[in-house]
Amino acid sequence: MRWGKQICGIFLGIFAMAFICPGYSEDVPLNVGSLRLSHDLRLEGVIHRVSPGWAVENNGLNKSYREIDSNGDKTPWTTEWGQSLLTDVAARFSPSVSGRILFELQGDYADRFWRPINEAHRLDQNDEHFILRQAEGKIKKENWYLDAFSGVSRPDWRAYGDFFRLYPETYFNEDYLGSSGFYGICQSRWNQNLFLNISETRVPQGLELGGSLYGIEAAAATGSELNWGYSNSYFGRVSVPVQSSKITAVYKDEDAPFAEDEDERDRAGTLSLETPFGSGNKLTVGAIYRPFRSGETYLVARETPGGSGLLGSSYNISQKTSHNSDGLGGRLRLEMQPEIFSRLWFYAVDLTHLGILAGNKNQIDVEAGTHISAYVRSDFKYTYRKPIEGPIPFLYEGTPANVGAIAANPRGPESPFNVNWSNREAAFFLATFQLNPDKYTSMFQYDPQILGRWNLFKEVKDKPFSMAVQYRMSDYKTTTDRQYYWDDSGEIVWESAAHSGAWASDHPLNEFRVIGTGTLASIGYFLGFSGGQMPAISSLAYDTDTSRPNKSLTEYWSVEAELALASWAVRGHYGSGIWGPEPNIHPFWGESYDRLWGAGVSYKITSNTVWDLNYIGARQDDNLFLPPSLGPFDEIRTTFSHRFGFEFQFQEM
């Protein structure tokens, strides 16, 4: 223990004081003229070992696994212990002025095999013990507001008429399970902060000022991390009512961290008109102008009869120059809610055209939904999109094993645009069915197409039984250009130029998801199943070299369950072919666990004191895909947490 006896004594003192102090509830509103100190004291123990025939070494924040000749001997268990104190200081100075700071004091760090890349691990390696996680201050008047924030989740401006979503939303929590089995039944206090873990930055950070006058709404925002990796950004919005309609203008001015020139700015403006008509019907039309990197050259590929193209390929490559007109785009969305055969239907048609600088795609979305019966809801969505200029193929002399002179390669940072996962040619179909005991209502708070536990209404969990089933088809018809990514140090890196883009799918990819939840005889339960095919993100995961440990596609399935009775909760999960849990590494590079299972139990000692015991087992059985950062192991993690706090009234309520 680096801190020695003095720091251990401090934590023992905090531990003793915690049980003397009263509990607290963050749900209770803060009184005017008061200061609240809310604490979460956590004591953690980790016991783990790698499987026989394997060894593990530290690789920066990450782990590196390798096979060894151990003659079948079992590896010993090792133990790690850690302590931390999370403190939220909140004050309300007047009915309209408030602020809060969330920081963490860390003693020892309990190093673990599962998700070793995290901010607590970074602090331990740097021999640091304090981290500011969040900070915000608010002034909220009747007609205007001012927010200052750092590391606090932010919604976008869609609800205020930002038709093209120029202002980015930012939600930083990543659940405890991997991306292929993402129901996340483990506790919210085990969530990981994506941005802090990867880049050591609090995202978003900035100021937002807004207000309304005579029906006109306006807002402006500026910050250094409003969008992850964008160090300097400005946004503005104005909405003007015109009878029952609304006209909204939005502007953005950002740096471009993915561009070669550090001084480049990405500027765009949109104008949209939202017009309601009839009962529940709405028409929205809008235009966008984004002349980013106008006047620069780029490559285009044109198909030719087989063998007559460049280097005997089916493509001819030529050069063009971008113009301001390439930054133009438009969108039209029609929403209608007619009553047909005594059923209220929802229809939507969404048409989008974006020039090569504005987004490089044409897209159509068609949605429909209705209640098949009083208790069964169905929703459908079909999407087809195609880039205006397709990707550039990788053309070279020689063979894949011995690449010679390169004649053409996918677009990279030198190009004013590229083809990526948001605009590559693809078709999607999504069907969702809900069974809900509440008549003509939805199970989901925010988006009926997202089957996540966080998306469920609380009332749904109190009913005897609710269920949702979803089918998704994805067909990626073309390849991509090069892409950029964040490495495990939080730096933006472009993929190698000497490589093709992510491959087209040979056939439509299918995924199924099922969730069920409710309460029977005072026992709350949650069930989840997901399975299907999920492609890797980076084009570097797509390779004919079988010696590489990367998968271009994983066929996975995952099942999870949880039961809760009184103060007890038990949970378990099992999955196969699940991507590893680091979102910027494992799904990106196509690295997965062959088998992953776990079990856990929680006991609520008091309303503010919880004990957790959890087990995770990982196995790698397929010798063809052995990523060095995902080895086989067994890990037991126990956590004891106690919440306590104080509230001081420094003026009359």
Image (tube, rainbow, N blue to C red):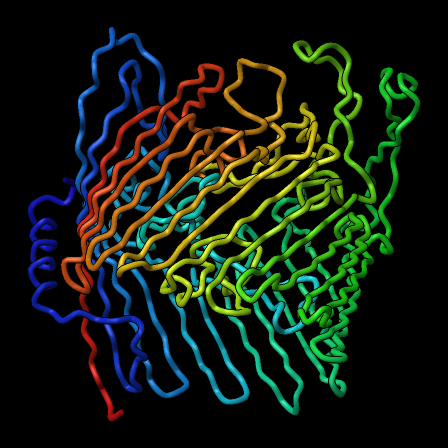
Nearer the observer, 197 or 615: 615
Work out which quarter of the rendered image holds the N terminus and state it: top left
Relative side of 178 to 646, left or right? right
Q: Residue at x 53, y 49 (%)?
A: 469
Left or right side of 41 for 298 = right
Residue at 88% x, 31% y: name it.
Answer: 302
Q: Is residue 502 left or right of residue 290?
A: left
Relative to 150, is 124 above or below? above
Rendered view: 55 above or below 556: above
Query: Residue 519, position in %: x, y?
Result: 33, 59
The foreground one among 475 and 544 is: 475
Residue in the picture at 33% in, 42% down: 122
Determine whether 588 is above or below 348 in the image. above
**Residue 336, percent from left and from top:** 73, 70
Question: Where does the image place residue 101, in percent across and percent down from the top left?
Answer: 33, 67
On the question of residue 200 being in view, the answer is no
Rendered image quadrant of residue 543: top right
